Amino acid sequence: MITQQHLASIHHADRDLYAREKILNSAIIAVDISSGWEAYLEIFDAFYADHVEVSDGTESGSVFGRERIRTLLFKFLVPLHVMAEIGGLSVRIRESPILGDTAAETHSAWSMDLIGVPGRVCQISWCTLRRWADSRVVYEGHYDHQQTGGPLTFDDLSLSPSSTSVSEQRPS
């Protein structure tokens, strides 16, 4: 009887873990970066522990603590937002779960399409491993990074140069 109750509680905990993972991933996908970057930071604050560790798969790539990671996110999100809002860049994010068998751990495959105004696409894909404690992510590792298509350039954005040259702006 005790074994059945223990297995039932593990099964319930797994359901909660996958439900939290699904809610987190759905929130990330639902945000429109052209409308702002702040919602991503709110999601990060809501789901990640203060003592979270994030790694890009290299030994020197680990960053510890929510504030340090929040700063890195800000440095990534703001330029992406500007390119989307002002430059016309389209950003499409997709995610699919990867089944695993380790307790308190989830995996998912991600891809982000950066689509320039003329239609050129750069796709970046990676996998994410998350370890959870209670309702917070305490570790997130990114692995299997891939890029399809070359980097986008200034020509892929709809930024037009100022109609007034620098010499015309100088007082006489």
Image (cartoon, rainbow, N blue to C red):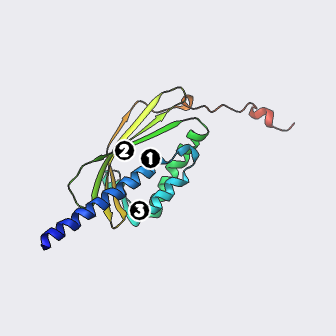
Q: Which mark is residue 29?
A: 1
What element does badge 3 sit on? Answer: strand
Residue drawn at the location 45% of the way across and 58% of the way down? 44
Foreground residue, 104 or 146?
104
Asked whether the residues under the numbered discs 3 and 2 touch, taking CB atoms below 8 Å apart as contact, a structural biologist would say no
Could you tell whether 10 is left or right of 66 in the image?
A: left
| Labels 1 & 2 near each other (Cβ < 8 A) | yes
Residue at image point 39% right, 51% down: 25
Where does residue 77 sit, x and y in percent of width and height?
Answer: 51, 48
> Residue 82's quadrant in the figure?
top right
In this orientation, which residue lies closer to the viewer: 127 or 26? Answer: 26
Instruction: For the C terminus, give its image quadrant.
Output: top right
Q: Is residue 147 above or below residue 137?
A: above
Tell me how many marks there are: 3
Disc sitting over residue 48 in the figure: 3
Of pointers 1 and 2, the one earlier in the residue sequence: 1
